[in-house]
Image (cartoon, rainbow, N blue to C red):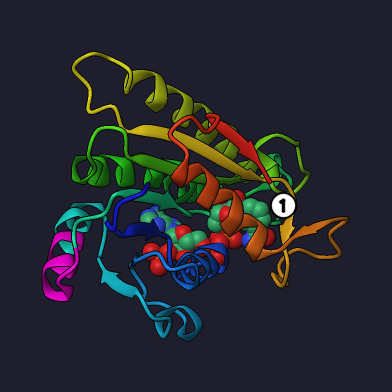
Amino acid sequence: MTDDRPVLVVGASGFVGSRVVRGLAAGGRGVLAASRHGLPAHAAVQNGVVPVRYTGPDTLRQAVRDACASAGVPLPGAVVASIGGWQLGAPLLDSDPDEWTATLASHLTAHLDAARALVPLLAPGDPYVVLNGAASREPMAGSGAVCVTGAGLAMLVQVLRLEATRPDAASVRFHEVVVDHAVDGDDRNADPAQTRTPAQVVSALGAVLDQPTAPAVVHV
Ligand SMILES: NC(=O)c1ccc[n+]([C@@H]2O[C@H](COP(=O)([O-])OP(=O)(O)OC[C@H]3O[C@@H](n4cnc5c(N)ncnc54)[C@H](OP(=O)(O)O)[C@@H]3O)[C@@H](O)[C@H]2O)c1
Protein backbone atom coordinates (compact mmCIF):
# COMPACT_ATOMS: atom_id res chain seq x y z
CA MET A 1 0.00 0.00 0.00
CA THR A 2 1.83 3.08 -1.09
CA ASP A 3 -1.07 5.45 -1.69
CA ASP A 4 -2.81 7.73 0.80
CA ARG A 5 -6.03 5.76 1.10
CA PRO A 6 -6.79 4.85 4.72
CA VAL A 7 -6.66 1.39 6.28
CA LEU A 8 -10.03 0.22 7.56
CA VAL A 9 -9.82 -1.68 10.85
CA VAL A 10 -12.99 -3.63 11.67
CA GLY A 11 -13.33 -4.79 15.28
CA ALA A 12 -11.69 -1.49 16.25
CA SER A 13 -13.19 -1.47 19.74
CA GLY A 14 -11.44 -4.72 20.69
CA PHE A 15 -8.26 -5.20 22.69
CA VAL A 16 -6.12 -5.88 19.63
CA GLY A 17 -8.17 -3.84 17.14
CA SER A 18 -7.94 -0.64 19.19
CA ARG A 19 -4.17 -1.05 19.53
CA VAL A 20 -3.85 -1.70 15.80
CA VAL A 21 -5.82 1.47 15.13
CA ARG A 22 -3.53 3.48 17.40
CA GLY A 23 -0.34 1.90 16.07
CA LEU A 24 -1.16 2.26 12.38
CA ALA A 25 -2.20 5.90 12.93
CA ALA A 26 0.94 6.62 14.99
CA GLY A 27 2.94 5.30 12.03
CA GLY A 28 1.38 7.95 9.80
CA ARG A 29 -1.38 5.97 8.11
CA GLY A 30 -4.93 7.20 7.85
CA VAL A 31 -7.22 4.80 9.70
CA LEU A 32 -10.95 4.17 9.50
CA ALA A 33 -11.91 2.54 12.80
CA ALA A 34 -15.11 0.52 12.40
CA SER A 35 -17.02 -0.64 15.44
CA ARG A 36 -20.57 -1.34 16.51
CA HIS A 37 -19.87 -0.09 20.04
CA GLY A 38 -17.58 2.94 19.74
CA LEU A 39 -13.85 3.20 20.34
CA PRO A 40 -11.88 3.26 23.58
CA ALA A 41 -10.42 6.71 24.22
CA HIS A 42 -6.82 5.65 23.57
CA ALA A 43 -7.71 4.83 19.95
CA ALA A 44 -10.33 7.52 19.33
CA VAL A 45 -8.14 10.49 20.23
CA GLN A 46 -5.27 9.49 17.94
CA ASN A 47 -4.64 11.87 15.01
CA GLY A 48 -5.56 10.36 11.66
CA VAL A 49 -8.34 8.14 13.04
CA VAL A 50 -11.82 8.43 11.54
CA PRO A 51 -14.43 6.46 13.56
CA VAL A 52 -16.97 4.42 11.59
CA ARG A 53 -20.00 3.50 13.69
CA TYR A 54 -22.21 0.75 12.31
CA THR A 55 -24.93 -1.55 13.58
CA GLY A 56 -24.27 -4.78 11.68
CA PRO A 57 -23.09 -6.25 8.38
CA ASP A 58 -25.97 -4.73 6.42
CA THR A 59 -24.95 -1.19 7.40
CA LEU A 60 -21.16 -1.55 7.36
CA ARG A 61 -20.39 -0.66 3.73
CA GLN A 62 -22.60 2.44 3.70
CA ALA A 63 -21.28 3.52 7.11
CA VAL A 64 -17.74 3.46 5.66
CA ARG A 65 -18.83 5.47 2.64
CA ASP A 66 -20.61 8.02 4.85
CA ALA A 67 -17.67 8.37 7.25
CA CYS A 68 -15.22 8.90 4.37
CA ALA A 69 -17.48 11.50 2.76
CA SER A 70 -18.01 13.45 5.96
CA ALA A 71 -14.30 13.33 6.94
CA GLY A 72 -13.18 14.19 3.39
CA VAL A 73 -10.95 11.13 3.10
CA PRO A 74 -10.77 8.57 0.27
CA LEU A 75 -12.39 5.15 0.50
CA PRO A 76 -10.13 2.54 2.15
CA GLY A 77 -7.24 0.92 0.31
CA ALA A 78 -6.89 -1.95 2.78
CA VAL A 79 -8.81 -3.81 5.48
CA VAL A 80 -7.60 -5.33 8.75
CA ALA A 81 -10.27 -7.57 10.34
CA SER A 82 -9.73 -7.94 14.11
CA ILE A 83 -13.01 -9.64 14.93
CA GLY A 84 -13.43 -12.29 17.60
CA GLY A 85 -11.23 -12.90 20.63
CA TRP A 86 -10.47 -15.54 23.21
CA GLN A 87 -12.80 -17.25 25.68
CA LEU A 88 -12.22 -19.78 28.45
CA GLY A 89 -15.15 -21.81 29.76
CA ALA A 90 -16.60 -25.27 30.07
CA PRO A 91 -15.34 -28.29 28.09
CA LEU A 92 -17.09 -28.56 24.73
CA LEU A 93 -19.33 -31.47 25.71
CA ASP A 94 -20.58 -29.57 28.77
CA SER A 95 -20.83 -26.13 27.18
CA ASP A 96 -24.05 -24.29 26.48
CA PRO A 97 -25.22 -24.98 22.89
CA ASP A 98 -26.28 -21.35 22.57
CA GLU A 99 -22.73 -20.22 23.37
CA TRP A 100 -21.41 -22.47 20.59
CA THR A 101 -23.85 -20.93 18.14
CA ALA A 102 -22.97 -17.41 19.30
CA THR A 103 -19.23 -18.06 18.89
CA LEU A 104 -19.72 -19.42 15.38
CA ALA A 105 -21.55 -16.19 14.57
CA SER A 106 -19.11 -13.76 16.19
CA HIS A 107 -15.81 -15.49 15.37
CA LEU A 108 -16.46 -16.99 11.93
CA THR A 109 -19.64 -15.84 10.18
CA ALA A 110 -18.89 -12.23 11.15
CA HIS A 111 -15.63 -12.46 9.17
CA LEU A 112 -17.42 -13.62 6.02
CA ASP A 113 -20.06 -10.92 6.53
CA ALA A 114 -17.35 -8.26 6.90
CA ALA A 115 -15.52 -9.46 3.77
CA ARG A 116 -18.77 -9.43 1.78
CA ALA A 117 -19.44 -5.87 2.92
CA LEU A 118 -15.93 -4.47 2.53
CA VAL A 119 -14.24 -6.16 -0.45
CA PRO A 120 -16.44 -4.20 -2.91
CA LEU A 121 -14.88 -0.99 -1.53
CA LEU A 122 -11.36 -2.16 -2.39
CA ALA A 123 -9.51 -2.11 -5.71
CA PRO A 124 -7.74 -5.05 -7.37
CA GLY A 125 -4.48 -5.81 -5.56
CA ASP A 126 -5.55 -4.17 -2.30
CA PRO A 127 -4.83 -6.15 0.89
CA TYR A 128 -7.49 -7.69 3.14
CA VAL A 129 -5.80 -8.97 6.30
CA VAL A 130 -7.49 -11.18 8.89
CA LEU A 131 -6.05 -11.49 12.41
CA ASN A 132 -6.19 -14.90 14.06
CA GLY A 133 -4.79 -16.42 17.25
CA ALA A 134 -2.93 -19.43 18.61
CA ALA A 135 -6.17 -21.31 19.28
CA SER A 136 -6.57 -21.69 15.50
CA ARG A 137 -3.55 -24.06 15.47
CA GLU A 138 -3.38 -25.50 18.98
CA PRO A 139 -6.21 -27.37 20.74
CA MET A 140 -6.95 -25.64 24.05
CA ALA A 141 -9.17 -27.24 26.70
CA GLY A 142 -11.99 -24.88 27.67
CA SER A 143 -11.66 -22.82 24.47
CA GLY A 144 -13.09 -25.37 22.07
CA ALA A 145 -15.41 -23.07 20.18
CA VAL A 146 -12.64 -20.51 19.65
CA CYS A 147 -10.25 -23.26 18.48
CA VAL A 148 -12.78 -24.57 15.97
CA THR A 149 -13.78 -21.15 14.68
CA GLY A 150 -10.12 -20.09 14.50
CA ALA A 151 -9.27 -23.18 12.44
CA GLY A 152 -12.30 -22.48 10.27
CA LEU A 153 -11.21 -18.86 9.87
CA ALA A 154 -7.79 -19.97 8.63
CA MET A 155 -9.51 -22.06 5.95
CA LEU A 156 -11.97 -19.25 5.15
CA VAL A 157 -9.05 -16.94 4.33
CA GLN A 158 -7.43 -19.62 2.16
CA VAL A 159 -10.63 -20.13 0.18
CA LEU A 160 -11.20 -16.39 -0.23
CA ARG A 161 -7.60 -16.04 -1.43
CA LEU A 162 -8.01 -18.89 -3.92
CA GLU A 163 -11.33 -17.57 -5.22
CA ALA A 164 -9.86 -14.08 -5.61
CA THR A 165 -7.50 -15.46 -8.25
CA ARG A 166 -10.40 -16.29 -10.61
CA PRO A 167 -10.14 -14.25 -13.80
CA ASP A 168 -13.51 -12.59 -13.13
CA ALA A 169 -12.76 -11.82 -9.45
CA ALA A 170 -11.84 -8.46 -7.95
CA SER A 171 -8.40 -9.90 -7.05
CA VAL A 172 -8.14 -8.40 -3.62
CA ARG A 173 -5.22 -10.17 -1.90
CA PHE A 174 -6.21 -11.99 1.30
CA HIS A 175 -3.74 -12.67 4.12
CA GLU A 176 -3.93 -14.17 7.61
CA VAL A 177 -1.74 -12.75 10.38
CA VAL A 178 -1.63 -15.25 13.25
CA VAL A 179 -0.59 -13.85 16.61
CA ASP A 180 0.77 -17.02 18.22
CA HIS A 181 0.90 -15.66 21.78
CA ALA A 182 -1.07 -13.43 24.12
CA VAL A 183 -0.82 -9.72 23.39
CA ASP A 184 0.83 -7.76 26.21
CA GLY A 185 -1.60 -6.18 28.62
CA ASP A 186 -4.64 -8.35 27.91
CA ASP A 187 -5.62 -9.56 31.38
CA ARG A 188 -7.94 -12.19 29.91
CA ASN A 189 -4.81 -14.28 29.20
CA ALA A 190 -3.93 -15.77 32.59
CA ASP A 191 -0.17 -16.30 33.02
CA PRO A 192 0.85 -16.62 29.33
CA ALA A 193 4.14 -18.44 28.58
CA GLN A 194 5.08 -15.78 26.02
CA THR A 195 3.58 -12.50 24.88
CA ARG A 196 3.77 -10.25 21.85
CA THR A 197 3.62 -6.47 22.03
CA PRO A 198 1.02 -4.46 20.14
CA ALA A 199 3.97 -2.89 18.28
CA GLN A 200 5.02 -6.34 17.00
CA VAL A 201 1.49 -6.98 15.75
CA VAL A 202 1.33 -3.58 14.05
CA SER A 203 4.74 -4.06 12.48
CA ALA A 204 3.74 -7.46 11.02
CA LEU A 205 0.51 -5.97 9.70
CA GLY A 206 2.36 -3.03 8.16
CA ALA A 207 4.69 -5.37 6.28
CA VAL A 208 1.75 -7.33 4.85
CA LEU A 209 -0.12 -4.16 3.93
CA ASP A 210 2.89 -2.73 2.12
CA GLN A 211 4.21 -5.82 0.31
CA PRO A 212 2.06 -7.21 -2.51
CA THR A 213 4.19 -10.37 -2.41
CA ALA A 214 3.74 -10.93 1.34
CA PRO A 215 3.02 -14.57 2.29
CA ALA A 216 -0.58 -15.71 2.58
CA VAL A 217 0.00 -16.58 6.25
CA VAL A 218 2.29 -14.64 8.58
CA HIS A 219 2.99 -15.64 12.20
CA VAL A 220 3.87 -13.08 14.87
N1 LIG B 1 -6.09 -10.46 22.83
C1 LIG B 1 -5.03 -11.24 22.62
O1 LIG B 1 -4.15 -11.41 23.49
C2 LIG B 1 -4.85 -11.90 21.28
C3 LIG B 1 -3.74 -12.74 21.11
C4 LIG B 1 -3.55 -13.37 19.89
C5 LIG B 1 -4.45 -13.15 18.85
N2 LIG B 1 -5.53 -12.34 19.05
C6 LIG B 1 -6.44 -12.19 17.90
O2 LIG B 1 -6.82 -10.84 17.70
C7 LIG B 1 -8.14 -10.79 17.17
C8 LIG B 1 -8.99 -9.87 18.03
O3 LIG B 1 -8.97 -10.35 19.36
P1 LIG B 1 -9.26 -9.40 20.62
O4 LIG B 1 -8.60 -10.03 21.77
O5 LIG B 1 -8.96 -7.99 20.28
O6 LIG B 1 -10.83 -9.59 20.78
P2 LIG B 1 -11.88 -8.63 21.51
O7 LIG B 1 -11.19 -7.72 22.48
O8 LIG B 1 -12.96 -9.51 22.03
O9 LIG B 1 -12.45 -7.73 20.34
C9 LIG B 1 -13.02 -8.32 19.22
C10 LIG B 1 -13.87 -7.31 18.48
O10 LIG B 1 -14.61 -8.04 17.51
C11 LIG B 1 -15.80 -7.32 17.24
N3 LIG B 1 -16.90 -8.27 17.06
C12 LIG B 1 -17.32 -9.23 17.91
N4 LIG B 1 -18.38 -9.87 17.40
C13 LIG B 1 -18.62 -9.30 16.20
C14 LIG B 1 -19.59 -9.51 15.19
N5 LIG B 1 -20.56 -10.46 15.31
N6 LIG B 1 -19.56 -8.73 14.10
C15 LIG B 1 -18.62 -7.78 13.97
N7 LIG B 1 -17.67 -7.52 14.89
C16 LIG B 1 -17.68 -8.28 15.99
C17 LIG B 1 -16.10 -6.42 18.44
O11 LIG B 1 -16.16 -5.08 17.99
P3 LIG B 1 -17.57 -4.25 18.00
O12 LIG B 1 -18.52 -5.03 18.84
O13 LIG B 1 -17.28 -2.92 18.54
O14 LIG B 1 -17.97 -4.16 16.58
C18 LIG B 1 -14.90 -6.62 19.36
O15 LIG B 1 -14.40 -5.41 19.86
C19 LIG B 1 -8.65 -12.24 17.15
O16 LIG B 1 -8.46 -12.78 15.88
C20 LIG B 1 -7.75 -12.93 18.16
O17 LIG B 1 -7.62 -14.31 17.90
C21 LIG B 1 -5.75 -11.73 20.23
Counting every numbered tag in the picture gives 1
Look at the picture and state if 195 lies above or below 101: below
Whether residue 104 sits left or right of residue 119 in the image: it is right
Report x, y in % for residue 86: 63, 55
Q: Which stretch appears magenta? A: 64-73
Residue 104 visible in this rendered orientation of the protein: no
Report x, y in % for residue 216: 52, 29
Look at the picture and state if 46 lies above or below 64: below
Whether residue 217 sits left or right of residue 58 in the image: it is right
Helix, strand or loop at label 1? It is loop
The kind of residue tagged 1 is Ala
Which residue is located at x 55 percent, y 30 percent?
215
The stretch drawn in magenta includes residue 143: no
Which residue is located at x 79 percent, y 59 percent?
195
**What residue does disc 1 label?**
90
Which residue is located at x 33 percent, y 18 percent?
165
Which residue is located at x 65 percent, y 48 percent?
95
Q: Residues within 10 Å of mark 1 (few under 14, many from 20)?
A: few
Q: Of residues 208 and 112, which is closer to you in this image? A: 208
Whether residue 194 sits left or right of residue 90 in the image: it is right
